[in-house]
Image: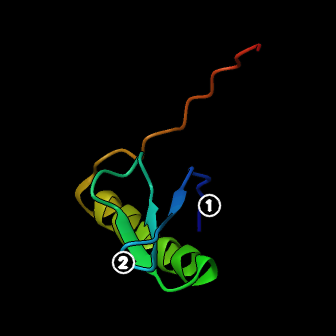
Amino acid sequence: MKEYQLPVIIEYDPEEDVYLADCPLLQGCYTNGKTHQEALAEIEDAMRVCIESRLAVGDPIPAPEYVTVAV
């Protein structure tokens, strides 16, 4: 079993009182949770499904790119 390290973004939406989770490298891979921990667990599951689906049809898994910025 191969492991992938991909960035996720988790933001709180005060209007909906929910945490939104997104994996920007996997288009359409997003979810939510009532707590930060729940959103993190949900995005991990969603990422697993997205990766399995991509691999099943032969689509590549994008590799993250990093940029160093001096401020």
For this view, does 44 lie left or right of residue 31? Answer: right
Q: Position of residue 12 (x, y in %)?
A: 51, 67
What residue appears at the point 62 percent right and 28 percent down from the top-left corner? 66
Q: Look at label 2 and name its amino acid.
A: Glu
In front: 20, or 31? 20
- Which numbered tag is attached to residue 71? none
Task: Count numbered badges in the picture.
Answer: 2
For the N terminus, the image quarter is bottom right
Taking 5 as reference, is 16 above or below it?
below
Going by the picture, which residue comes out furthest to the left?
57
Indicate the position of residue 20 as horizontal and vertical percent values.
Answer: 44, 68
Pick the front one: 39 or 48 = 39
| Residue at 34% over, 62% down | 29
Residue 41 sits in quarter: bottom right
31 on left or right of 7: left
Secondary structure, mark 1, is: loop
| Residue that extends furthest to the right in the rendered view of this protein | 70
Which part of the image, by quadrant, shows the C terminus? top right
Q: Label 1 is placed on what type of residue?
A: Glu
Q: Which residue is mark 1?
A: 3
Answer with mark 2 or mark 1, whichever residue precedes in sequence: 1
Crowd around label 2: few <14 · some 14–19 · many ≥20 (10 Å): few
Residue labelled with disc 2: 16
How are the colours assigned in the image? rainbow
* In this rendering, the label closer to the viewer, 2 or 1: 2
Residue at (36% x, 77% y) in the render:
16
Give the spatial CA distance, label 2 vs label 1.
33 Å
Label 2: which secondary element: loop
The percent coordinates of residue 59 (x first, y second) are 28, 48
Residue drawn at 43 percent across, 41 percent down = 62
